Amino acid sequence: MVGVVGSAKLPLAAPLPAASGCDGYRTFSYMGTQLPLHILLLLAGLATLPACTNSPGLHEGPLPLMTQDPAPADWPHYLGDPATTQYSALTQLDTTNVAQLQLAWSYASGDRDTLDRSQIQCNPLVIDGTLYGTNPQLKAFALDAATGEERWTFDPAVFSDELLGMGTNRGLSYWTDGTEARIYYPAGPFLYALNAATGTPVQSFGSGGRIDLHTGLGDGAREQFVISTSPGVIFEDLIIMGGRVSEDLGAAPGHIRAFDLHTGELRWIFHTLPEPGQAGSETWPDERSPLTGGANAWAGLSLDPERGYVYVPTGSAAYDFYGGNRPGDNLYANCVLALDARSGEKIWHYQTVHHDLWDRDHPATPVLLTVQHDGTPHDAVAQVTKGGYLFLLDRDTGEPLFPVEERSYPVSDLAGEVSSPTQPMPLLPPAFTRQKLTEEDLYPFDSVMNREARELLATSKHGGPFVPPSEEGTVMFPGFDGGAEWGGASYSPSDRLFFVNANEMPWMLKMNPVAGLAGEDPGRAVYAIACQACHGSNLRGGGVFQSPSLLGLATRLDGPQISHTIVNGRGAMPAINWLSDQQRRDVTDWLLALPADAEMKEILATTGQSDKEEATGEGAWPYPYIMDGYKRLKTGDGHPITAPPWGTLTALDLDAGSIRWQIPLGTYPDLAARGIDDTGSENYGGPVATAGGLVFIAATLDERIRAFRSRDGKLLWEAQLPAAGYATPAVYAVAGKQYVVVACGGGKLGTRSGDRYVAFALP
C-alpha cells in the first residue's frame, strides 16, 4: 500500500544543468548515474586521463571488484558498499538544486506501536529499481523504488506464532549469481533467505529458508539471548555474521561465524572469547566464569573483497560494568579485528579499551578508505567510538596511522575489581565530542536547574574518560549511547572528508552493593538485581532500550505469561534464564501485585538490608555489585544538564588528522519556540555523503531530514518527516532520477512511533 504525507514547503524546481563536474570534466549518464568521463573510462578499464582532486566519484586506491556489483545507481549494500562508506557517487542532486527537493513518495509499512515504543532503524537496499526494507515488526518488503508501490511482503511469523526476542533490524544483504537473486536478513534469533523477486523463503537454505543464529555458540547458548540487529556481509559463497547477545549474567559468547549461502551450513567460526590455548586466552583468568559472555559484533561488519578480509568491531565482555571475575585485558572484547573472510583466521587485532567497565562497545562498522599519509596513498580502517574518538588503522597490519598514547587513569575502588591502569588514547584526529564535564559546562537556560546540576556533579565522580564505576555514581560523558552511535560515519572520496554525527548527553553509572538490595520482600530484591537496570527503579521503563512500564502489569499479562517472558525474552528484552525457579516466582508475584496508580514511594519502599536466605537464595547475583540503571542526566524540563551542543555533525580531514568543521545537529522544539534553536539534539542514524557535495542526515528528535554542504557544513535544505528518522538514509537513482529515502520509525527519545519510508527527489 502506498501512503501520502504532506510535502515540505520548498521552492519550485529550476532547470538542471546539462553537465556538471570539476574543471575540464563533464559528466555523462551511465546506467542512470551522472559520472565524469574519466570515471566512466575507469569502469571500462580504459582510463589514462589524470584525475582532478574534487571530481565526483573519484575512487581512492585500488578499484574494488565490479563484476558482481549492481549498477552504480543502486544502493546495493548495507550502508552503501562493502566498505560501509555511506557514500553515493550520484551527482544529479548538488549544492545548486538540493533546495528544490520535494516528496516523491511515501510507503506505510504497517505495524506501528500505538504506545510509541516501536522503531525502524533499517538502511534499505535499492537494486535494479527495487527497494528492500523492513518494518517495525521486522516484516521484509520490496517496493518499486521510483513510486513506493509495494511488490511483496514477508512475515517471519509464518515460521512461528510467537515472536520473542526480536529486537530491531538495521539492514539486509543481497546476493545474485546472475540467474537467481536472494535477500538475506536477520529477524530476532534467525537469519532468513528470501527469493528477491517474490519474497518467498528459499527452501534449500537451512530449515525451510532460515537458520538459527545460536548455531556454533555452544550447547548452553541454545537457551540464551542471541539475535542480530545488523545484516551480514556476503563474500563469495559465504554470509558472515556478528550478532547481539545479553550484556548481563550468563550472556552468550559473541563469536563471529560464516555460513554457506546456499545451505546455511556453518563454515567457520572465530572465537571472540578465546578457547583455552588459543591466542588471546592469556588475557583472561585461567578458568573463565561460565557466566562471562559478550565480545560480540552487534554493529555490523565491513568487507575488503580484494584482500578477502572482513573487519569486525567487537563490544565489551559481559557482565558490562563489573569485571572482578575477569581480570586482564579481555581479548577480543573492544577490538577492531581483521579476519580472513574465507577461513576466519585472524590477520590482526587492535584493542581500543582494556578490561571494559563502561559498556564502550564499538558502536558502528569500521569504514574502509584510502588516506594520504606521509605523502602517499594508504589503505586504512577508520573506527569511531562511543567515547568520541576515531582510531585510524593500517588496513593490512592494524597499526595506528596517527600516534596513540597509553595514558594512566584512576583505578577502581570497588571490592574485587582490577581495572586497567592505562587506556589507549589517539592523539589525532582530535576528539569530536567534549570529554570532560565541569561546572562551566552545565545548563545555562535556567538558574534553578543549573544549581541542581551543580549539586549532582558535586556528589558524583567525574573528570574525563575512564573514571571507573563507583557507588557514589560516575558521570559518563559522552554517555552510554556515545559519542558515535550505530548510525555510523560517512566518507566522501570526492571531498576527502569523513562525516560523523555524535551525542553529547551525560549519563550516570552507579553501582549498588548487592547486599543492600535484598530488603524484606524477595521479589523486590530479584527485581533490583535482574530488571531494574532497564525498567528503572520507578518501574516506568524508557531508558536506552525503550523498556515498557511495568506498573499495572497484571492488567496485561498473567503469571505464566510473565514467567515465560522472563525465561525466553521478548522484543529487545533478553532472556533472564539464570534465575532460580523460586526467584522467578518471587519477582512474578511481586510484579503482579503492583497497582497501576500506586504512589512510587509505596511501590518502591524497602525496609533496609536483610540477610534472609530467600531474598538472595540459590543462583543469586554472584558479583558484589549491580548497576543501578541506564539513566540520562536531564533537567526538570527534559533537557541534558549540560550546556549545548547536545548533538553534533563533524567533518574530519583524515589526511591531516584534523577537524575541518563542526556544527550542532538538531533542535529541541520547545527551546526553538523560545528562539534557542542552535542547541543540537540527541540523534540516532548516520549521514550519507554524495559526489554532489552534500551530506544528508535525519537522526534528530525534531523529526526532520537535512542536507548540508559538505565542504563547510552550511544547511541547504530540510524537510519535516512523519516521524523521526532514526535510521541512515539511502541514495539511489531510477531511470536517471536521483532519490533520497529514509525510514521514519521514531519511537526513541520520547518521540512518536511511525511506520513510513519517505523518498525525496527533484520535481
Image (spheres, helix red, strand yellow):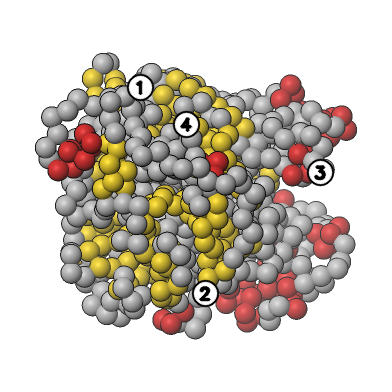
Give whichever of 595, 433 is nearer the camera.
433
Residue 756, percent across and down?
Answer: 56, 63
Horizontal side of 617 relative to 286 (left or right) equals right
Q: Earlier in the sequence, mark 4 or mark 1?
A: 1
Q: Nearer the viewer, mark 4 or mark 1?
A: 4
**Mark 3: secondary structure:** loop
Image point 34% across, 57% down: which residue? 735
Q: Mark 1 touching mark 2, by CB under 8 A? A: no
Image point 56% across, 72% down: which residue? 110
The disc at residue 637 is 3
Q: Earlier in the sequence, mark 4 or mark 2?
A: 2
Mark 3–mark 4 Cα distance, whole angstroms, equals 34 Å
Residue placed under numbered mark 4 in the picture: 710
Name which residue type carries label 4: Ser
Q: Nearer the viewer, mark 3 or mark 4?
A: 4
Q: Nearer the viewer, mark 1 or mark 2?
A: 2
Q: Mark 3 touching mark 4, by CB under 8 A? A: no
